[in-house]
Image (cartoon, rainbow, N blue to C red):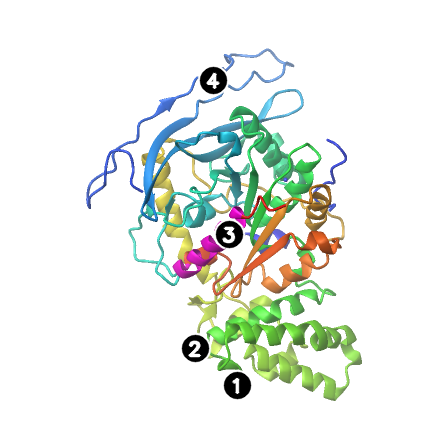
């Protein structure tokens, strides 16, 4: 259930485990002109010769492929940025030195830097589990991006790329990681693949990638940052705790559409917490679609959610806790308030026993219009085959982003980055097996690992970006998690937040992308403040 919940769209000492819990080379392109192939610089690496091995021996070492290196430039804010792109596979080895998997990565380093050791380095990934890093890469951070319509909706095909004036490359070098089972990353043998398809195995393999990158590219003393989205925030928070015990401390972490405590979003029998956590997002969505009473509709979305938060954290929580001990008048008051904040018919709320699950809300809010709403972004409307079912046929917001990102990336990696492969690039799903969450009658909560990282490294700063219309990782649940980490008040000040009038991937909305970049720019600029 939890894997399906987040599959969309994206870590020895005594470290706790995860549960502890533009313009391109070749000149300016003109319409109709094919991109000029970028030159490829070959870097020599040593690989062992392979051959037939006798029975009972260990597998022969897998020869490594040299990374592909190309050179590019773009204009950002009237300034030319020249940079080098390094694309390749990083071997992930076991304790015996045998390569068990290869992780695909794309790195961008700014040219002309006098002291690389002092230049910030950001490792970025998305979530899933099972999502490649393409969303943050081609949507927000990288030097090239996929333009959607200004409001984030899908443009008409064919799709294309533009120079990303909002790239983070002017402040930090960037490394995009595709965990095993995503993108081109693969386990080398089927019998070891399941080891990577787990909470702890994923953290260990991505952590090993980071160690290897720091070693091979001599970046151990660079200021280090993590940027994760969705399950990528689960991974980032766990990685911070996992790697601090191995001597790798981060200066900052950017968490975009965060989930660390999975209890906050699992609509399971006996767990009333998600109904409270989702209510402010329901209110924001109903406001956006103009389904609230006139007095609420006239307010700003910020005021609407503030009122919803207050009621949800107090009276609604108490009403749910009482269960069938609610008096008739108390129950009616709760029904009226829920209708007031959600725009849902009181009879429906009564029949749902005051508990509106996400699928019910996505189907019910616009039922009279014969439309459903998206999960990643509740502003999007979907067309269902039937309007009497309990939930939507599909996520209209995911349907809008998948074709543009899939087609543009597959073209970009082969033409601009000159990386040739006939493998399918697993954008979202398709490359992983069943996910092992490593829990027994409990919930994953990687905020414990983040707390440990903060306790050991009080210089660590964290920026949390949240979308009002995100129905995959509701922002109120993120607030709840942060305020239940049991941090010293002094360390709690290491957190900063940003709220956006968009969904899970707020950067597909160009206005919100600009706001996100401004917030992250300030965050990175201030990392030296101790």
Residues at discs 4 and 3 in contact (Cβ within 8 Å)? no
Residues at discs 1 and 4 in contact (Cβ within 8 Å)? no
Sequence order check, earlier mark of 1 and 2? 1
- Are there few (<14), some (14-19), or many (20+) residues within 10 Å of tag 2? few
Sequence order check, earlier mark of 4 and 3? 4
| Front disc: 4 or 3 | 3
**Rendered position, 127 above or below 481:** above
| Front disc: 1 or 4 | 1
Residue behind mark 3: 522
Q: How far is mark 1 from mark 4, CA to CA?
A: 67 Å
Mark identifier at residue 295: 1
In this image, 364 relative to 167: left or right?
right
Query: Is residue 516 part of the magenta span, yes or no?
Result: yes
Sequence order check, earlier mark of 2 and 3? 2
Q: Residue at x 48, y 50 (%)?
A: 521
**Rendered position, 301 above or below 446:** below
Sequence order check, earlier mark of 3 and 1? 1
Residue 125 picture location, percent across and down? 52, 43
Would residue 47 be visible to someone looking at this image?
yes
| Front disc: 3 or 1 | 3
Quarter of the figure with the C terminus: top right
Quarter of the figure with the N terminus: bottom right
Residue 14 picture location, percent across and down? 77, 35
Mark identifier at residue 45: 4
Q: Residue furthest front?
A: 529
For numbered disc 3, what is the local secondary structure?
A: helix
Q: What range is drawn magenta here?
A: 509-525
């Amino acid at each position: 259930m939890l894997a399906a919940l987040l599959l969309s769209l994206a870590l020895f000492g005594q470290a706790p485990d995860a549960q502890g819990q533009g313009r391109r080379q070749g000149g300016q392109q003109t319409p109709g002109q094919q991109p000029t192939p970028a030159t490829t610089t070959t870097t020599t690496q040593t690989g062992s010769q392979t051959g037939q091995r006798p029975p009972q021996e260990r597998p022969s070492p897998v020869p490594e492929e040299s990374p592909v290196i190309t050179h590019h430039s773009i204009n950002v804010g009237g300034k030319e940025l020249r940079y080098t792109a390094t694309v390749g596979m990083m071997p992930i080895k076991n304790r015996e030195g045998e390569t068990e998997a290869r992780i695909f990565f794309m790195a961008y380093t700014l040219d002309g830097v006098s002291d690389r050791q002092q230049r910030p380095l950001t490792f970025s990934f998305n979530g899933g589990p099972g999502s490649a890093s393409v969303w943050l890469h081609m949507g927000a951070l990288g030097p090239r991006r996929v333009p959607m319509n200004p409001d984030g909706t899908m443009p008409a095909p064919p799709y294309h790329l533009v120079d990303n004036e909002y790239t983070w490359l002017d402040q930090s070098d960037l490394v995009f990681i595709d965990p095993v089972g995503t993108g081109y990353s693969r386990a080398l043998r089927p019998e070891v693949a399941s080891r990577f398809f787990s909470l702890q195995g994923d953290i260990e393999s991505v952590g090993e990638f980071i160690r290897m990158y720091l070693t091979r590219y001599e970046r151990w003393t660079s200021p280090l940052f993590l940027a994760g989205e969705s399950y990528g925030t689960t991974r980032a928070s766990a990685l911070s705790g996992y790697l601090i015990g191995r001597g790798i401390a981060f200066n900052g972490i950017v968490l975009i559409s965060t989930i660390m405590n999975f209890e906050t979003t699992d609509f399971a029998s006996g767990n009333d917490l998600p109904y409270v956590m989702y209510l402010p997002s329901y209110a924001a969505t109903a406001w956006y679609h103009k389904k609230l009473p006139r007095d609420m509709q006239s307010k700003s979305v910020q005021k609407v959610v503030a009122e919803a938060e207050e009621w949800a954290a107090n009276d609604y929580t108490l009403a749910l806790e009482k269960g069938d001990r609610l008096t008739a008048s108390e129950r009616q008051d709760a029904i009226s308030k829920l209708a007031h904040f959600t725009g849902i018919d009181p009879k429906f709320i009564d029949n749902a026993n005051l508990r509106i699950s996400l699928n019910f809300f996505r189907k019910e809010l616009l039922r009279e219009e014969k439309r459903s709403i998206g999960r990643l972004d509740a502003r999007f409307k979907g067309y269902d085959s039937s309007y009497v079912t309990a939930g939507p046929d599909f996520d209209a917001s995911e349907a809008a982003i998948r074709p543009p990102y899939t087609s543009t990336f597959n073209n970009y990696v082969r033409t601009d980055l000159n990386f040739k492969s006939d493998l399918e690039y697993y954008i979202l799903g398709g490359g992983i097996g069943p996910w092992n969450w490593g829990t027994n009658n409990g919930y994953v909560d990687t905020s414990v690992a983040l707390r440990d990282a903060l306790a050991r490294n009080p210089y660590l700063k964290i920026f949390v970006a949240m979308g009002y219309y995100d129905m995959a990782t509701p922002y109120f649940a993120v607030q709840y998690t942060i305020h239940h980490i049991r941090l010293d008040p002094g360390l709690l000040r290491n957190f900063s937040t940003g709220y956006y009038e968009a969904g899970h991937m707020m950067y597909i909305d160009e206005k919100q992308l600009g706001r996100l970049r401004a917030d992250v720019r300030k965050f990175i600029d201030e990392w030296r403040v101790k």
